[in-house]
Image: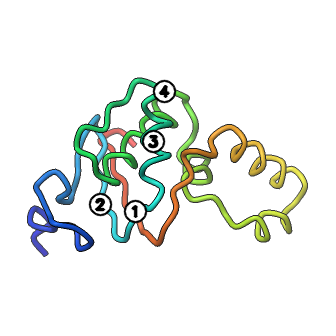
Amino acid sequence: MDYSRALPDEYAGWWGGAHPFSILDWTVVHNGEISSYGINRRYLEQFGYHCTMQTDTEVVVYAVDLLIRKHKLPLEVAAKILAAPFWRISNVKTPGNRNLHRTLRQVYGSLLLNGPFTIILAHGEK
């Protein structure tokens, strides 16, 4: 597949939404739709990010950058924030894990990505 020509299905495509999407040393390819774009964008703007491309892919890159580079969280924790398990699943885990998931949702709830999606993330150093 020629990824340089992959354009979004749900709206009129433009080059800014094409995959792979690369910015800030991160490259993302994703499939699906992230319906939480608005709240995710507003949260990121509080930390100085400007979503000029206005795409859900851009929000993913900035969210990962915030969590991993700026907040120094491990990739595994960032994944738990962005794609948190359902409460009914996290509630059956050990109390320590349950508390971790609850804390992550309280602190980073506005970065939770909603919608059906799959994300592939790459970084030159990771």
Residue 19, position in %: x, y?
A: 20, 60
Q: CA separation, marks 3 and 1?
A: 13 Å
> Which of disc 1 and disc 3 is earlier in sequence?
3
Residue at (28, 34) in percent of width and height: 24
> Which of disc 2 and disc 4 is earlier in sequence?
2
> Which of disc 3 and disc 2 is earlier in sequence?
2
Q: Label 3 is placed on what type of residue?
A: Ala
Residue at (58, 44) in percent of width and height: 110
Left/right of residue 79 with respect to residue 102 in the rendered view: left
Q: Secondary structure at mark 3?
A: helix
**What quarter of the picture does the C terminus occupy?**
top left
Q: Secondary structure at mark 1?
A: strand
Residue topped by disc 3: 63
Residue topped by disc 4: 46
Disc 3 vs disc 1: Cβ atoms closer than 8 Å? Answer: no
| Furthest residue toward right | 95
Residue topped by disc 2: 29
Left/right of residue 30 with respect to residue 42 in the rendered view: left
For this rendering, which residue is in front, 118 or 115?
Answer: 115
Q: Label 1 is placed on what type of residue?
A: Ile
Q: CA separation, marks 2 and 3?
A: 14 Å
Q: Label 2 is placed on what type of residue?
A: Val
Q: Nearer the viewer, mark 4 or mark 1?
A: 4
Left/right of residue 36 with respect to residue 13 in the rendered view: right
Q: Pointer 4: residues within 10 angstroms few (<14), some, or many (20+)?
A: few
Disc 2 vs disc 1: Cβ atoms closer than 8 Å? Answer: yes
Residue at (37, 71) in percent of width and height: 32
> Which of disc 4 and disc 3 is earlier in sequence?
4
Residue topped by disc 1: 119
Q: CA separation, marks 2 and 1?
A: 6 Å
Residue 85, position in %: x, y?
A: 67, 64
